[in-house]
Amino acid sequence: MQQEHPLGEKEITVDVVIVGSGASGLSAAVRSRALGLDPLVIDVADRFGGTVPLSSGALWIPDNPVMRAAGVDDSVEAGLRYLEECVGDAGPVTSHARKRAFVREGPRLVEFLMKHGVDFQYSDPYPDYFPELPGGHERGRIILPRPFDLRRLGSWSGQVATVPGFKMKLLVNSVREVMDLPFAGVAPQGRHALAAVLSRTLWSKALGRDEVSLGQALVAHVLLVAQRLGVRFAPRTALRDLIVENGEVVGVTVRAGGRTRTVRTRRGVVLAAGGFARNEEWRKRYHPQPSSAQWTTVGPHDAGDGIRAALEVGAATALMDEAIWTPVSVLPDGNVAGTVWERETPYCIMVNGHGDRFCNESANYMEIGRKMYEQDNASWWLIMDGRHRRRYPYGDALPGRDPKKWLRSGYLRKADSLAELAGLCGLPPERLRATVERFNKMADAGVDEDFGRARSAYDRSGGDQGHRPDPNLGALREAPFYAVRQFPGDTGTAGGLLTDEHARVVGEDGSAIGGLYAAGSTAARMTGRVYPGGGASLATAMVFGFIAANHAADRVPADR
């Protein structure tokens, strides 16, 4: 990147200002530049990608060309029907027009990125989260980028945000591999995934490559497109205010290099600055309680800056009480870890503070998070028996190993009986015993009569394929017994600015605010209070960033 800050002048004029360099911001940037506009991307961070590098990099897009090339049947009509069935109607934010715009423009976004060199692959199989609904897909609609050699970016190679806590760059090639790796010690699916990932990683290293995969690869692929097209970036630049003249947004004021600068626009401003997952004040104001910024998995800059700026010019919001909920645990060092395979496998259940099961433990994370908030207490636990700990990893603890610091701190609670474990967790012993006994009978019969665990193809896809007769259900009988406290965390907020099918921000009076667009977590999610499939968050972000650029390009340029 440039050594000096690109905003050297006190005031400059560009066609489009894009606030944020995550999935939606990068999408809007490369599309607007390809359409002949002069975009400027500003970001408060010193590297680009927002929270995307922390993700799988997957995109959930119905009837996309990568699926078609793999011979997988789908259609825009089926995708739209599925969205109508599972998302429903939560008001203007989930309007038919917005859903239709997403399924129509999604394949066009993928075609555009592929034309400019982004190398996608189909991730098969990974079902939609509600595959049994009309229009649902059991093989899945997920695509993700192939690993990327950062050396291709040249002087920009250090501009992709890193993934904290990872010492080795494991090159994972699909969401399926991510899901299968925890089973490396017990099932063929895991052994195959581990062998593939290790051989790919070691071969890359032997060739001297500097490759990344998943979310980092998605950022790197699109950043290379931006580099080739000549998109300008301004890191370490914070949005302060929107400039409004004659009822239209005509620019922004920003803070960079210790100075306040003005950037005026001819076509508009795209707010793609993330949500407000790190804003403790807003979480207390809008979210159900308890809620904490400590429980989110998003990056540190997700503080609501774009939403705040738009609210000051009369923008409307929607779904501010909603997030992409996911159960998490808080590690002894204060970091959080999502609970995924740990709850999807046999020999475990989740209970509330009364010792009762309250959900299908193998359901998608957002559904479980919503169920957590439906409880009349603020205590949630994952209960496991000895077979669970012998067969499966928990976080980064290998099977059969109980880290001493986890036991000393109380993060992992271990007991020789369920009654003793209940005492360690503050749960009613008899209630927990009754819950486990009922679950064990259902697990032995292979039918969860209470919550339908293992009934869905999605449930089964995340379980232990080496476990018979069922990949998800297994009785809790063998001591010692374990528990880890769970919290309703999130992978980002779902509420934000209300936008229409053109990604235009809507005002309190219901009309679009001229020159102002929003996408990604800055905008209220088109999928409303439901998560239709893995990769839906990044997909809607990139598609509506693409749509915003298309609409801005068609606007009559202002002579300012």
Image (cartoon, rainbow, N blue to C red):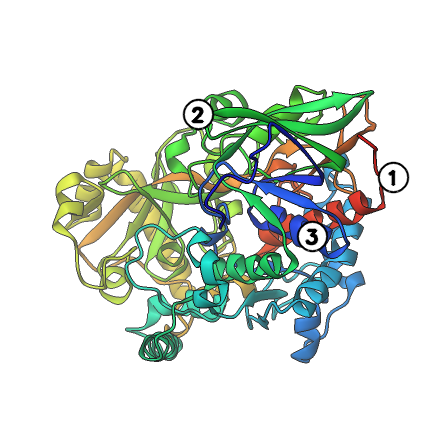
Query: How packed is label 1: few (under 14 Cα within 10 Å), some, or many (20 or more)?
Result: few
Q: Which mark is residue 50?
A: none
- In the picture of the structure, the residue carrying the numbered disc 1 is 556
Q: Residue 138: horizontal and vertical position, in percent?
A: 62, 68
Task: Look at label 3 and name its amino acid.
Answer: Val
First of labels 3, 2 by sequence position: 2
In x, y percent, where is residue 288?
A: 50, 27
Relative to 20, is 74 on the left or the right? right
Question: Residue 391: image x %, image y %?
Answer: 26, 67
Label 3 Cα neighbours within 10 Å, binned few <14 / some 14-19 / many ≥20: many
- Give the mark toward the camera: 2 or 1: 1
- Badge 1 marks a residue whose secondary structure is loop
Q: Position of residue 312 (x, y in %)?
A: 66, 19
CB atoms of marks 2 and 1 within 8 Å = no
Q: Which residue is mark 3?
A: 543
- Looking at the image, residue 506 sits to the left or right of residue 354; the answer is right
Task: Find disc 2 in the rendering and name its residue.
Answer: 280
Q: Which residue: 47% across, 71% down? A: 173
Give the class, few, some or many, for how many residues have Cα within 10 Å of label 2's Cα (few <14, many ≥20).
some
Q: Disc 2 marks which amino acid?
A: Glu
Quote the CA–CA distance across marks 2 and 1: 40 Å
- Vertical comparison of 559 with 46: above or below: above
Q: Secondary structure under badge 3? A: helix
Q: CA distance from mark 3 to mark 2?
A: 29 Å
Earlier residue among tags 2 and 1: 2
